[in-house]
Image (cartoon, rainbow, N blue to C red):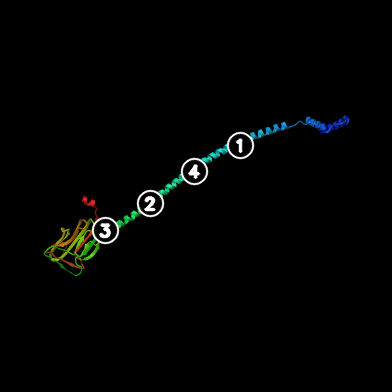
Amino acid sequence: MKGLVCLLLLLETFVFVNGGLNENEISQQLSSEDRRQNPPQTDTLRAEASTDSQQYCHLCFPDIHAALRELTATVTEQKANIRALENRLRDAEQAAEQQTISLEELKKKTDETSNLTLSQVEELRKENRDREIAFSAGLMESGSGDVGPFTTEITLTYRNVFTNIGNAYNPITGVFTAPLRGAYMFRVSVYGIGPTQASASIVKNGERVVTAYDAQAQGGLNSSNGVVLILEVGDVVYVRLWPDRRIYDHSQNNHNSFSGFLLFPLREDELCRM
């Protein structure tokens, strides 16, 4: 600054001595002098700015690249996770759809089984009702007295019915008719007062099977017998009193009785094996 002041003083002196300089000349001289004393710093500033920029880039760019690499890795990982989740979701949807189909099939089978079970239960009920076959009856429905003797064999009618499940026994005719193929148990009992002979037989389809027999000169006599028979549907079983035989009964004591019941039904193949 001091140099500039001195320069101005010299110029004034010079102008005064030489008759003066014009304003442009003075300005040019001042500019020249100023450049000489204060050379431009543009290049230096530019160099410093470039150096600072390089240093800043040198410091920042590695961090940016690292961040970019880390971000890229994170994005890639997230994409992989998304794909995995999409695959799991697709698998879950397929599994749910399969389970829905399985549940529908199970429900359908359950309904069919339920209907089948109900049908089977009803069939079993009907079959059980068919199997409920049993009867038992006494000879006299009321009073007391002798039956016989007769010159020919006769069918005894047991009219005092105790049990007749299935209504297979007819108390009017004294005949049992098999409603179901199967094995049946029959029993007969006879009673008389001597002197007499008591003889009665269980008959199947007109053929004598077993006989209950007793003879006594005096006093009471009794006998019984039983048999298991294989009957087809429609086979008949009844009791026949022998000729010249006499039995005695009392409606309250029921000395003479005829009973039968189904042991179990038989299928066709079981009958063939027999």
Residue 122 visible in the snapshot:
yes
First in sequence: mark 2 vs mark 3: 2
- The amino acid type found where label 4 is placed reads Glu
Q: Residue 43 carries which label?
A: none
- The amino acid type found where label 3 is placed reads Asp
Count residues near mark 1 (Cα–Cα under 10 Å), then give few for <14, some for 14-19, many for 20+.
few
Work out how far the residue at label 2 is from the one at label 3, CA to CA, in angstroms. 32 Å
First in sequence: mark 1 vs mark 3: 1
* Relative to 256, residue 28 above or below: above
Is residue 50 toward the left or the right of residue 247 in the image?
Answer: right
Q: Identify residue for label 3.
A: 130
Is residue 153 toward the left or the right of residue 23 in the image?
Answer: left
> Pointers 2 and 3 in contact (CB under 8 A)?
no
Q: Identify residue for label 2.
A: 108
- The amino acid type found where label 2 is placed reads Lys
First in sequence: mark 1 vs mark 2: 1
Q: Identify residue for label 4.
A: 86
Work out how far the residue at label 1 is from the one at label 2, CA to CA, in angstroms. 64 Å
Q: Nearer the viewer, residue 21 or 177?
A: 21
Is residue 252 toward the left or the right of residue 8 in the image?
Answer: left
Work out how far the residue at label 1 is from the one at label 3, CA to CA, in angstroms. 95 Å
Location of residue 157 in the rendering, given as x and y in whole percent from the top left corner: 18, 64
**Element class at badge 2:** helix
Q: Identify residue for label 1.
A: 64
* Relative to 112, residue 30 above or below: above
Count residues near mark 3 (Cα–Cα under 10 Å), then give few for <14, some for 14-19, many for 20+.
some
Location of residue 41 in the rendering, given as x and y in whole percent from the top left corner: 74, 32
Query: Between tags 2 and 3, which lies in front?
Result: 2
- The amino acid type found where label 1 is placed reads Ile
**Element class at badge 3:** helix
Work out how far the residue at label 4 is from the one at label 1, CA to CA, in angstroms. 32 Å
